[in-house]
Image (spheres, rainbow, N blue to C red):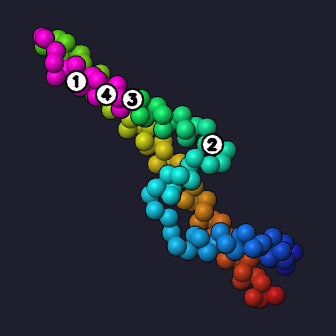
Amino acid sequence: MIKFDDDLGAALTAEDKAFLADLENGRGLFEQLGATLHGPMRFWSYIVGIATFLLFLLAIYCGWQAFHAADVRETILWSAGFVALFQGIGLLKMWMFDRMNLLSLLAEMKKIELRVAQLSDRAG
């Protein structure tokens, strides 16, 4: 256990200390959303963001067409498209918020790791 504590204390760099200080302030919604646009999954985050925007535009178009449809059948079909597209938007937003939650949990785990390293520095 002593070797683990020594390794953990040695791994605590100035960058880690700055990261820990940043975590103490907390992050807002837009900062967390911006954090999803970095790292190994950034490509998918960009794709999800673009797809969500495109689905929103298509949903608005379907809603507009449903509002101006000539007969009941067209209104029902355009409205079904409107509802289906908003379901897709909801699913993509759930993915994005799950990603934000994962990054938040990883940050908390890093904070705990750094706290353990600080405790081992004080004890050693």
Residue 52, given in percent of the width and then of the height, sits at 43, 34
Q: Residue furthest right?
A: 3
Q: How far apart are the alpha carbons under marks 2 and 4?
A: 27 Å
Name the residue type under label 1: Trp
Give above or below for 121 relative to 64.
Answer: below
Residue extent of the magenta highlight: 56-71
Separation of residues labelled 3 and 2 (CA atoms): 21 Å
In this rendered view, identify the residue nearer to me: 22 or 79: 22
Name the residue type under label 3.
Answer: Leu
Q: Position of residue 76 (x, y in %)?
A: 19, 18
SS type, badge 3: helix
Disc 4 vs disc 1: which is toward the camera?
1
Which residue is the site of mark 2? 41
- The mark that comes first in sequence, 2 or 4, is 2
Mark earlier in primary sequence (3, 1): 3
- Whichever of labels 2 and 1 marks the residue nearer the N terminus, that label is 2
State the residue position of label 3.
55
Q: Which mark is residue 59?
A: 4
Determine whether, in the image, residue 49 is placed left or right of residue 86: right
Q: Which mark is residue 91?
A: none
User: Which callout, 4 or 1, points at the residue further toward the start of the chain?
Assistant: 4
Q: Note whether 48 is above or below 25 in the view shown.
A: above
